[in-house]
Amino acid sequence: MAFDLVVVNGIIVTASDVLPLGIEIGIKDGKISCLGSSLPRDANTQIIDAKGAYVTPGGVDSHVHFAQDNCPTGDDFTTGSRSAIAGGTTTVLAFASQEKSETSVIPVVEEYHTKATNQSYCDYGFHLILTNPTPEIMQKEMPLMIEQGITSVKLYMTYEPMKLGDSELLEVLMSARSLGFTTMVHAENSDIISLITDRLEAAGHTDPYFHAISRPQIAENEATYRIISLAELTDSPILIVHMSSEIAVKHVRKAQTRMLPIHAETCPQYLFLLSERLKGSHHDAFEGAKCVCSPPLRHDPKDLEAMWRGIANGTFTTFSSDHAPSSYDHPNGKKLGLKSGIMRYRDIPNGVPGVETRLPLLFSYAGSDKDSRLGLQRFVQLTSSDPAKLYGLDGTKGNIAPGYDADLVIWYPEEDLKDGVNIEQKMLHHGVDYTPYEGMKVKNWPRYTILRGKKVWDRDNGGILGGMSDGKFLKRGKGKIVVGKTGGEVNGMLAGERDYWV
Ligand code: DUC
Ligand code: ZN
Ligand code: ZN
């Protein structure tokens, strides 16, 4: 059998191994058929020469916001997924977001299918943001969602229009325990943030920097401890999204040491950016709005260090972009927080773009040279294989092995990019008008991105080669627990005590 595509001269990296140079990847019908040497080829076989560079699985970015009503000046599926493939990401998990007034999630999901069908350059799935988890939804609609391949939900502990109280969080966790969907949680204490925000506003402290003052670490710390406690009580696995502070991550680490199934995610902004970025420049006093995201950028480099530690030591299961794009220079974008010359941070849409820069930023620190902070296998775990497992895509995404989708990133051989790449807004493919990483240098960039055997990105020859209908909806299975296990006893409860009430 001849292959459709053979990738030669690469160094294949998976979550477990860095293979010797030159193992070939044989691809047929969009799937990896085999790894080997001197693979058969005929006149129709396309050959890609990796020229000695690393080849990693296509990125799985398990946290992006595309086409959400609360970021109308940001990316739709077309621009967001285009940006994804140009940065080596072949799968995104985006959010279908329920409004509190909606009493069924079925039309919500239909709407997001309409927004995405034939409009995505990469494969995609949906998490459901649940803001009104009625008994009807939890009992009747969630089983349908799971059947349709939507096997994860995101819950907010903050934001008036979205937040759930503890009793609602508990109900969803109980339901997740019985139905087997994965629960993601935004952990910040809402009342702490509201109290400080109101008092800052009364004192006239409303410029973007005060966004960070209004959401201190203690808000993340308290909510993190609380949601871990609720998850422990209900014996339900969770993933805490976009973690930013050392003190909160310590709760996760401690829970993991007890073998609780508590997963955590961090994002590029919490590895590279500090709250000083929220201060304006002398050209533009409002420029800090570009970096308003929640949790906020932290003040102390020690927090960045702690996130790097969690990246290296296994505390984090996923490294996602939390691509939450709003254009800066747009009256309905970040400039919602600037009216008649008055800056008001609470009106600035939250979030930063990052789907395209996520892999190159982390890859710059992966390897074994003196600046490295994580191994290459760990890079693959965090950016591709572990999110695939956690969100029900194992066996299909996140690996370079027979039977998996042929989603690959082929990087440059080191000698071809000796000076690295300077990140600049003008080279990116998202739909917003800035990047928070402007001017940062990365060591490498995806030279080719392959989606199910098709070259969809060739940085030197045409850039985007894929099309808007290349991406397909991923009907996901139930997620796997990556860290810890269920079935443990709750601290201080008798063995079997929970059985009286579950
Ligand atoms: N939470 C997210 O997940 N993304 C952007 C803003 C937020 O609060
Ligand atoms: Zn969030
Ligand atoms: Zn998000």
Image (tube, grey):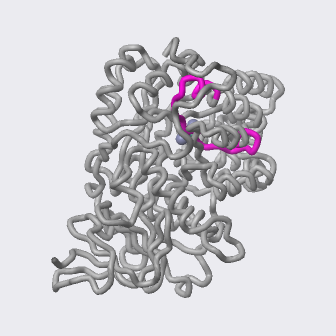
Asked if residue 78 is positioned above or below residue 130 in the image, the reply reads below
Question: Residue, x 42% and y 41% (percent of image)?
Answer: 479
Res 263 seen here: yes
Name the quadrant containing residue 451.
bottom left
Give coordinates of residue 91: x percent, y percent.
39, 54
Pick whichever, 104 or 391, lies toward us. 391
How many numbered discs sit on the rendered protein?
0
Question: Residue, x 53% and y 45% (percent of image)?
Answer: 324
Q: Tell me if 408 is positioned left or right of 242 in this view.
A: left
Q: Tell me which image quadrant ligand 3 sits in.
A: top right
Asked if residue 345 is positioned above or below residue 462 in the image, the reply reads above
Q: Is residue 211 magenta?
A: no
Question: Residue, x 36% and y 75% (percent of image)?
Answer: 462
Give coordinates of residue 416: x percent, y percent.
52, 86
Q: Tell me if 392 is positioned left or right of 147 in this view.
A: right
Question: Residue, x 79% and y 54% (percent of image)?
Answer: 301
Q: Which residues are magenta?
A: 229-249
Name the quadrant containing residue 169.
top right
Pick whichever, 188 or 292, lies toward us. 188
Quarter the N terminus occupies: bottom left
Give coordinates of residue 255: x percent, y percent.
66, 37
Res 431 seen here: no
